[in-house]
Image: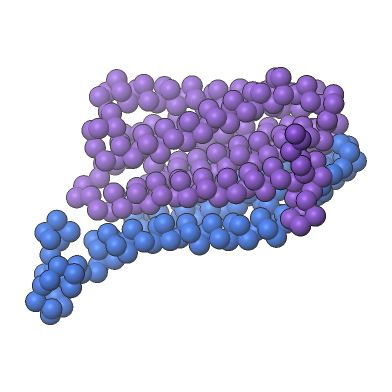
Chain colours: A purple, B blue
């Protein structure tokens, strides 16, 4: 059975079903991360003392990760634009770059976490480290999820270009919306956890 | 920008114009990231530092949402979904603050803890760990 309105817009919403679906999913993700940010605010303001975050965390590495993720957002939207302009090889280039930048982000994160653990800084040590690992860990899981989708769309999923190019273009756009949201969460995580 | 059914390449000229915008937004995001880090080195007092960091982050997020996520010129149903989300987001922040955040907003749990009924000044009110 074919899912309806994956290429043509629904007459009532004016959108394809996947597009509306992903936005509604992102709305739920806003609530997920929002509740964790709310927890952070309550934990920090209610604490008798709170560590100087920038003295525990690695600001230069996190700045690099911010640049990596912003770059991956650009390459993601450029991969969609390439498909809209009928340039499949450019699509594969930009989607491939998006995936590699995701790998880069996770590698930097692995170094960060490894360094914390080496110094005995585990989530159980204090509330700051607890909320730090939960927030960045959940964000990291979202990055991995996005990379699985992006990897599929770069690899076996890209075969759809030959048979249903518009459907693939729309799939890439929807995957892009998710990926930009992951970047958006980091845009808030970075200053809140590393700089304040 | 048309997101409805269209043959790939049909609005390629429009897309080329958008690609230029994407690179400009990328540049702006990088500059704003550096500004965010630079401001942190100023060691401003806590409240202005928080406000400034969140204002810059919100502006960066708006750029990503408006241009990369194509929210600019999107259909009304998406906007209304996001307005509703914003309302619930504010609630998910405000409700814990209101119920548990006496230490933040200076309210007194005195009335709920069965005290004498006379309001007390914040210096004399029981702390959050003294119920």
Residue in front for this viewpoint, A193 or B46: A193
The structure residue drawn at horizontal position 27% and vertical position 59%, both measured from the top left corner, is B100
The location of residue B93, given as percent across then percent down, is 40, 57
Q: Name the residue furthest left.
A: B116
Q: How many marks?
A: 0
Q: Is residue B75 above or below residue B8?
A: below
Residue in front for this viewpoint, B66 or B84: B84
* Res. A73 image quadrant: top right
Q: Is residue A169 above or below residue B76?
A: above
* Res. B49 image quadrant: bottom left
The quadrant of the rendering that contains the N terminus of chain A is: top right
The structure residue drawn at horizontal position 40% and vertical position 26%, both measured from the top left corner, is A112
* Res. A148 image quadrant: top right
The location of residue B56, given as percent across then percent down, is 52, 52
- Compared across the picture, whether B63 is left or right of A48 comes to right
- Compared across the picture, whether B9 is left or right of B89 comes to right
Q: Name the residue furthest bottom.
A: B118
The structure residue drawn at horizontal position 86% and vertical position 31%, both measured from the top left corner, is A86
The location of residue A141, given as percent across then percent down, is 48, 31
The location of residue B91, given as percent across then percent down, is 43, 61
Q: Name the residue furthest front.
A: A1
Is residue A51 in sight in this rendering? yes
Residue in front for this viewpoint, B86 or B32: B86
Is residue B34 in sight in this rendering? no
Q: Is residue B58 above or below residue A4?
A: below
The structure residue drawn at horizontal position 45% and vertical position 60%, both measured from the top left corner, is B90
């Amino acid at each position: 059975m074919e899912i309806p309105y994956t290429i043509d817009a629904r007459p009532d919403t004016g959108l394809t079903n996947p597009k509306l679906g992903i936005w509604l999913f992102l709305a739920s993700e806003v609530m997920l991360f929002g509740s964790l940010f709310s927890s952070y605010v309550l934990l920090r303001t209610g604490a008798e003392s709170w560590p100087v975050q920038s003295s525990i965390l690695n600001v230069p590495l996190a700045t690099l990760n911010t640049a990596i993720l912003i770059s991956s957002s650009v390459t993601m939207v450029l991969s969609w634009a390439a498909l809209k302009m009928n340039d499949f090889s450019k699509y594969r280039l930009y989607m491939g770059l998006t995936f590699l930048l995701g790998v880069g982000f996770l590698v930097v994160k692995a170094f960060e976490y490894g360094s914390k653990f080496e110094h005995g800084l585990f989530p159980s040590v204090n509330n700051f480290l607890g909320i730090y690992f939960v927030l960045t860990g959940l964000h990291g899981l979202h990055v991995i999820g996005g990379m699985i989708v992006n990897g599929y769309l770069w690899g076996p999923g890209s075969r759809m270009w030959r048979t249903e190019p518009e459907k693939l273009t729309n799939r890439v756009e929807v995957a892009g919306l998710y990926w930009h949201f992951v970047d958006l969460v980091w845009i808030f995580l970075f200053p809140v956890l590393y700089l304040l | 920008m048309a997101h409805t059914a269209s043959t790939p390449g049909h609005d390629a000229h429009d897309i080329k114009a958008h690609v230029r915008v994407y690179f400009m937004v990328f540049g702006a995001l990088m500059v704003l990231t550096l500004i965010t880090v630079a401001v942190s080195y100023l060691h401003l007092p806590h409240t202005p530092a928080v406000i400034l960091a969140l204002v810059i982050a919100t502006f960066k997020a708006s750029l990503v949402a408006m241009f990369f996520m194509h929210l600019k010129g999107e259909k009304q149903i998406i906007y209304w979904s996001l307005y509703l989300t914003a309302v619930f987001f504010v609630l998910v922040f405000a409700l814990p603050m209101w119920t548990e955040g006496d230490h933040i907003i200076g309210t007194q749990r005195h009335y709920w803890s069965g005290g004498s009924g006379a309001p007390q000044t914040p210096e004399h009110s029981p702390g959050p760990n003294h119920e």
